[in-house]
Image: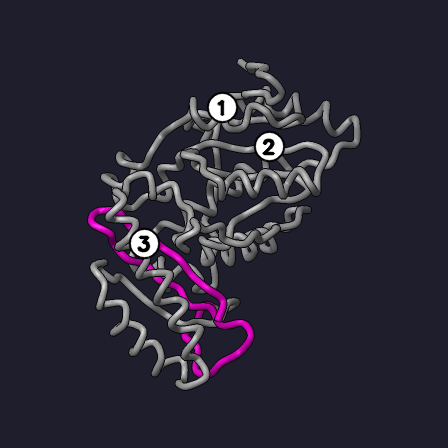
Amino acid sequence: MSLLMQNAMLIKTARELSDSLKTARIKKKIVGFVPTMGALHNGHLSLVKRAFLENDFVVVSIFVNPMQFNNQEDLKRYPRTLEKDIELLSSFENLIIFAPNIEEIYPENEVFIPIDLGGLDKVLEGEFRPGHFQGVVHVVHNLFRLIMPNKAYFGMKDFQQLAIIKFMNKYYGFPLEIVACETLREETGLAMSSRNMRLSENDKEDALVIWKTLLFIKEKKGNFSPKELQVKAIEFFKLGKLELEYLAIVDSETLKEADDWKSSNVCCIAAYCGEVRLIDNLLV
């Protein structure tokens, strides 16, 4: 059942969502879409604000997608703050908050055939989180079909995910534009993330080694080849307290390791701060 708040509308079923969007389209409204897993922060809100600058009407989904978690403990610990999320979004006009249960996203009679992602899902995150990106593609595919937005907004912090969503969008031929938005950071440089809710103040200080390493790479790129600098950056990172999972300098389109410097190079890092897994990246 839909719930009308101060300005935004909370909807929990696909049928109500379809009815509401039908009304918007009859009025020839341009629809933007911001998919989230909740635990909203200023990074998410920056996507919503960007969407409102470019569209008449915006849908924000809040759905913790079980299909993209290969670690069930990580799924259990993922922060769920729906009431707070609704409060953060309630002042926006012409906004739908779509907060479905699992049956609305994955109906019992659904037929979904996984697609070949051309190797984009096998490297970086894919190497350590098998099946993760097929889960991402599945949920985003289903959300796109339900909402059929004109534009969809994704943060660049999840750089590999963004590359895969662009690939998926082209593969299925959805008539929408994928809009990449800059990573929002704390004043310290730490990338905003829902997982930061699980970090203590000391943890956040320790986690700054990720940002410092990315800046180290950008500063030193003129002195070394990508592979040489990768080795030195790993040495620099290990001076900190986090446990490095991977650090790679890759081509931003193919995600293959870079042999030389181009304008499209990106450095991607994943590391553990205690039990909390953090990722970040920087175009270098």
Tell me which residue sits at (51%, 21%) in the image: 12
Tell me which residue sits at (55%, 75%) in the image: 263
- Pick whichever, 158 or 46, lies toward us: 46
Q: Residue beneath label 2, please?
A: 59
Is residue 105 part of the magenta span, yes or no? Answer: no
Rendered view: 63 above or below 271 = above
- The residue type indicated by label 2 comes to Val
Q: Quadrant of residue 69?
A: top left
Q: Earlier in the sequence, mark 3 or mark 1?
A: 1
Q: Residue furthest front?
A: 187
Callout 2: SS: strand
Q: Position of residue 127 (x, y in %)?
A: 31, 61
Rendered image coloring scheme: one colour
- Pick whichever, 211 or 175, lies toward us: 211
- Circle 3 packing at 10 Å, graded few (<14), some (14-19), many (20+), is some
Q: Earlier in the sequence, mark 1 or mark 2?
A: 2
The disc label shown at residue 87, or none? 1
**Magenta range:** 255-284
CA–CA distance between discs 1 and 2?
Answer: 15 Å
Tell me which residue sits at (46%, 68%) in the image: 266
| Residues at marks 2 and 3 touching, judged by CB atoms closer than 8 Å | no
Q: Residue beneath label 3, please?
A: 130
Q: Quadrant of residue 232?
A: bottom left
